[in-house]
Image (cartoon, helix red, strand yellow):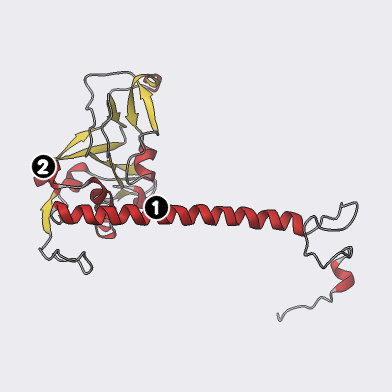
Amino acid sequence: MYPKVRFRGFDESWRTEKLKNIGESFSGLSGKKSSDFGHGEAKYITYLNILNNPIIDTKLTDKIEIDNKQHLVKKGDIFFTISSETPQEVGLSSVLDTNLNECYLNSFSFGYRLKEISMFDNLFNSYNFRSPNFRRKMYILAQGISRYNISKKAVLNETICFPKISEQKQIGKLIKLMNSLLSLQQRKLELEKQLKFFLFQNAIPSKEAVIFKPKIRFREFQDKWKYAKLSEIYNTTRGAS
């Protein structure tokens, strides 16, 4: 397999492997009651953390008591959602890019651990397992009507394509840069929306204003605004029936 666009200097074919051949799965928390959550010296990675983040946000973990019977997560693990109300949210993945002490996985997801972690870049994996090609496979596997589920066994039977680690790192750096640029643009857009709302609120006076003038206006305009009913200044017409 060869991608259509790639960095100069890389021309080797990408490998294609079934997930079950290059890694192993593990389950999330089991045997827990609602009273076990929200306190304790251990942490667990929540379902929403996986759903919303290609890379796990380590600040968004919840507390739980230490339980040596549970499976601890570690850097490089990939987590998959196994149940959702929509097929678009089933099989969504997130990569753990740092080591966490005494941390488990929620019970509505399963973990996947690569056997040769040195062969993979975490940033690349965060993109690869959310790529359109891999997501289409997850849509097909999602089963249900009012709620959709995915089989861990079926996911492990799917294939993933990847290049050698040096090309993965280049792709990962590019993705990180693009995400940073998108975040900056998103923040800029939010600020401009706030400015637009402020202008609407202050550039058009309210009916109750004591002096019927807007709080903000162009320098050359100082006259009061007029106030009238629409029926006094517009004629109404009926459209074709």
> In terms of depth relative to the viewer, which is nearer, 107 or 172?
172
Query: Looking at the image, is mark 1 or mark 2 earlier in the sequence?
Result: 2
Say whether residue 84 is left or right of residue 129. Answer: right
Q: What's the amino acid at mark 1?
A: Ser
Q: Is the residue 29 above or below the residue 118 in the image?
A: above
Which callout, 1 or 2, points to the residue nearer the camera?
1
Q: Can you tell which quarter of the image residue 14 is in?
A: bottom left
Q: Residues within 10 Å of mark 1 (few under 14, many from 20)?
A: few
Residue 135 image point, x, y percent: 28, 55
Residue at 23%, 49% (x, y): give it: 125
Outermost residue on the front side: it is 219
Q: Residues within 10 Å of mark 2 (few under 14, many from 20)?
A: few
Q: Can you tell which quarter of the image residue 151 is in?
A: top left
> In terms of depth relative to the viewer, which is nearer, 124 or 54?
124
- According to the picture, the residue beneath numbered tag 1 turns out to be 180
Residue 139 image point, x, y percent: 29, 55
SS label for mark 1: helix
- According to the picture, the residue beneath numbered tag 2 turns out to be 116
Q: Can you tell which quarter of the image residue 217 is in?
A: bottom right
Residue at 38%, 24% (x, y): give it: 63
Q: Is the residue 168 above or below the residue 49 in the image?
A: below
Quarter of the image that includes the N terminus: bottom left
Say whether residue 184 is left or right of residue 205. Answer: left
- Residue 138 appears in the figure: no
Quarter of the image that includes the C terminus: bottom right
Q: How many marks?
A: 2
Tell me the CA gap for discs 1 and 2.
29 Å
Residue at 10%, 63% (x, y): give it: 13
Q: What's the amino acid at mark 2?
A: Glu
SS label for mark 2: loop
Residue 92 image point, x, y percent: 31, 47
